[in-house]
Image: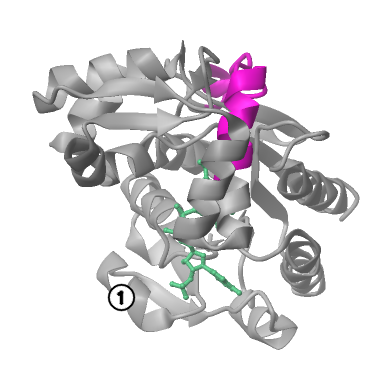
Amino acid sequence: MKIAVTSASGKLGGSIVKHLIKEVGKEHVIAIARTPEKAKHLGVEIRKGDYNNREDFNLALKGIDIVLLVSGMDEPQKRIIQHRNVIEAAKSNGVKKIVYTSIVGAEENNAFSPIVQSNRQTEKDIISSGLEWVIGRNGIYIEPDLEYLETYVKEGEIRNCAGEGKCTYTSREELGYAYAKMLLEEKHNGKTYNLAGNAITQSELVTYINQIYDTQLVFNSISFEEYATERKAALGDFMGTIIAGIYEGIKEGAYNVSSDFEKAADRPHKSPLEMIKNFKG
Ligand SMILES: NC(=O)c1ccc[n+]([C@@H]2O[C@H](COP(=O)([O-])OP(=O)(O)OC[C@H]3O[C@@H](n4cnc5c(N)ncnc54)[C@H](OP(=O)(O)O)[C@@H]3O)[C@@H](O)[C@H]2O)c1
């Protein structure tokens, strides 16, 4: 059996490859990457795959039984077309099953909604592909906050527009574990799972970070307009709007969802404190 993971040079794709290797061994896992040299460290066969290039995937998916499609990073309308390149190539290569990493979030009236809508369109494309399928709707990763810690410490605070909204954070590590099961076990076929952890506020997140990293951060809530202006200045219009939309969504409860993680992974999701502890190592 051959299982391929797209965007394997990225952090989520890499985590899924790592967990798959633990389950089935290196010889059954193929890493597909737009930039193959960035996936070398995974120690498995690497094939080239740029979502913009259907021909890449016609070749990369030869002899593959199951493919995991990691959602892309581009503008919403482009993503839909890019994902279709992978779905169509999977169909024409006789791939039997496709697993897709989608996202939890507000489908309307939020700055992040266009991204959520594009993920929902790909879900529909996958469901109507005729292949066996499983869809995971990922919660928000906890790692970016931890990777950003140096900046938070410099500023003495975590500042965003989430207010008292709760977010069911997950981690790329937890997702990697669950997706390996979803790829390998047939009982998940035809299921859409929310892959998320326990719901916490930003104030609770700050308390846990302070506990593990021995920091003295505080949480300060600012308006969406103020936060969007700040993030756009730092990250550009596209990414700044996405980030502000995510925190707006947290405030509105879009990420306070019931989780199917245990159904997918056959074990409970790790608590936020455990995820932070594991990330620190
Ligand atoms: N749930 C969340 O909190 C959350 C947060 C951020 C992102 N996401 C979504 O989850 C996905 C994976 O996240 P991550 O943490 O693994 O991101 P990451 O570490 O930044 O990796 C992004 C990956 O996407 C690949 N990529 C970009 N454009 C591509 C293209 N045209 N064709 C093929 N691959 C392409 C990159 O390849 P190169 O190595 O060639 O650049 C890289 O492997 C993201 O793409 C995004 O859709 C979710």
Q: Residue at x 65, y 48 (%)?
A: 99
Q: Is residue 159 left or right of residue 134?
A: left
How is the rendered protein coloured?
Answer: one colour
The residues colored magenta run 243-264
What x and y, as percent, mark residue 3?
53, 60
- Quarter of the image with the C terminus is top left
Residue 147 % position (x, y): 27, 46
Q: Residue at x 66, y 28 (%)?
A: 193
Magenta residues: mostly which secondary structure? Answer: helix
> Can you say whether 17 is above or below 209 in the image?
below
Residue 91 in the figure: left or right of residue 213: right
Crowding at dot 1, Cα within 10 Å, few <14 / some 14-19 / many 20+, comes out as some
Does the beta carbon at disc 1 come under 8 Å from ligand 1? no
Closer to the camera, 29 or 54? 54
Residue 188 visible in the snapshot: yes
Query: Could you say where residue 227 lies in the image, as x and y percent from the top left?
Result: 52, 39
Q: Report the residue that reaches farthest toward the left.
A: 214
Residue 138 visible in this rendered orientation of the protein: no
Residue 150 coordinates in the image, percent (x, y):
19, 45
Q: Is residue 6 above or below residue 50?
A: above
Is 257 magenta? The answer is yes
Q: Amino acid at mark 1?
A: Lys
Please give the residue where the numbered disc 1 appears in the rendered image. 40
Q: Residue at x 57, y 78 (%)?
A: 49
Query: Residue shown at 52%/21% (left/top)?
Result: 167
Q: Is residue 213 left or right of residue 248?
A: left
